Each structure stands twice: as structure tokens, then as C-alpha cells.
Image (cartoon, rainbow, N blue to C red):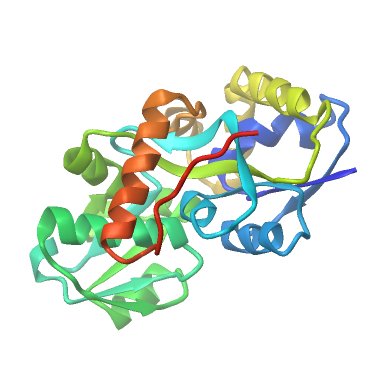
Amino acid sequence: MLRFGCHNFLNAKPLTFALTNGILKHNFELISDTPANLSDMLKEGRLDIAVIPSIEYARIPGLKLIRDFSISSLGTVNTVLLFSKNEIHDIETVAVDNSSRTSIAMLKIILKERFKVSPDFIPVKPVISEMMDRADAGLIIGDNALKINRKKFVTYDLGEEWYLLTGRPFVHAVLAVRDEIDLGDGLNILKKAKEIGLSSINEISSEESKRLKISKEVCIDYLTKRIIYEFGDNEIDGLHYFYKLSKEHGIIDEDVRLQFY
């Protein structure tokens, strides 16, 4: 049995819906955890395949990427948000959740490249009230970002800011498998699961709107207009550029060569 790790955010549901709801027979042991923990588990060999933050592929040796799978965006994404008391040029401190590894890297690059500022980053639990008590701004990712009233803050959508900076998609997460793993029919099952998930957005949105206590319309808009699940030439180009800037800013140490399963 293959050990497959995936986070529980709304944006992953189209990839896992058919697997977790008994629609497809499969040979996976499904493991849900935070993106950061899934990366660590894959690195330590406790998972065979996992959806991990894109920055972690650059840091973990011995992984291959699965084509046709990513969690990406082109422009406004709505779930990687910087909430601030001040305009961005006046930010001196940013509260971040250290488990938000890719988003922290993305934010550092955007702040330096686009706005020419380098605030101090403070690790804080991802609760907006605590973050704003401790710092000038707070980085919130995932489903929590969909629930916060943006009108209370100066709000920057990092998907939009990345696009304004680079003109490229941003790859938030990738599907990676350890080198030695043979997925067998598992890859075809994952492709079929994604196909079923993307054709079940209405049902997924109905379920998730209740779980998250947000409107169904918000869920549908997010899953159909904000998130890209492909990993084609444009997404690969965006990922290469993210790694290039990450190296230039000292976030990663070496050039990254993408290897595919």
C-alpha cells in the first residue's frame, strides 16, 4: 500500500474527493497533515508520495515531480494574504506562521523585489488578532484567509502581487514522489481522481462551505477561477523563476533541476 499525504485545505479537495469518498478504489493509505509536516514525512521516508509546498521540493533530495498536478494560481488567489495596519512601505515587522514555508519565501521575494523593503519576520500562531498584536502585518494562508474581513486591514493578495512582479503563475504546491517508489497503477488512479474532483466542484463546494462556514459561491469561485491544477509549461516556467529568485535572495542554496516521474 502506498502512503499518500495531502493537506486538508479547500484547494486540495478536487485532488482527494474521489479517494476519500469511496468513489474510486485505490491502493493508498491516505494521510492528512499540514503541508510542512507532510514535507518532513516525505523527507524522512514516512510517506511515499505527497502534495508538498513547492519550496520544499528544492530542499529535499531524491524526489520526482508528477506531471499534470499542481496547486497554482495566476493572479489573485485569495488564500495567501498579507494583512497590514499600514501601507506596505511602512511595514517593519511581519508575523508569520513558520509552517507556511512557500508563502514566507514568496512574501520575502515580493517585499524585496517589488517594494524594496525587508521587514523583520516574527513567528506567531496564525491567528490574525495575535499577529496584529505582535507585528505591523500578518501573513495568513489557506482556508483561514477566506474568512477574514479584509476591510479591517490594508490587504495584499500575494498571488496578485507575484503576477504584477513576474507576469508568471505561482506554483504553491507540487505532487512529489520519492525516487525509489513505483506508483504502478497509482498514478492512473490519481489522474482519474483529479478528473472526478474537477467535475464535482459543485458537490465539493456544498460540503466545504458548511465545514468552513463560508458561502458556496466563494468556494466555487476559488476552486474554478483562482486555483490551477495543471502543471504545464507555464506553471513549470513560473516554478523555475520562483527558484531562481529564491536562490538570489538566499532562501535556497543551489540551483534546482526539476526531475519528473
**Residue 167 left/right relative to 87:** right
| Extreme-bottom residue of the structure | 134
Q: Relative to 56, is 20 above or below?
A: above
Q: Is residue 129 or residue 158 the one in the foreground?
A: 158
Please give the name of the residue rendered at 77% of the width and 46% of the height, measured from the top-left corner.
180
Residue 245 appears in the picture as rendered: yes
Q: Position of residue 214 (x, y in %)?
A: 49, 43
Seen at 27% across and 78% down, the residue is: 135
Residue 149 visible, this orientation: no
* 193 lies left or right of 204: right
Is residue 103 or residue 124 the one in the foreground? 103
Task: Note whether 174 is above or below 44 in the view shown.
Answer: above
Tell me if 103 is positioned left or right of 40 in this view. left
Residue 3: % across, % down = 81, 48
Task: Report the residue at 31% width, 82% height from top.
Answer: 134
- Residue 29 is situated, as x and y percent measured from the top left of the image, at 85, 46
Give 4 or 200, whichever is nearer the viewer. 4
- Percent from the top left, x then y, of residue 222? 44, 33
Q: In which quarter of the image is the C terminus?
A: top right
Q: Residue at x 42, y 33 (%)?
A: 236
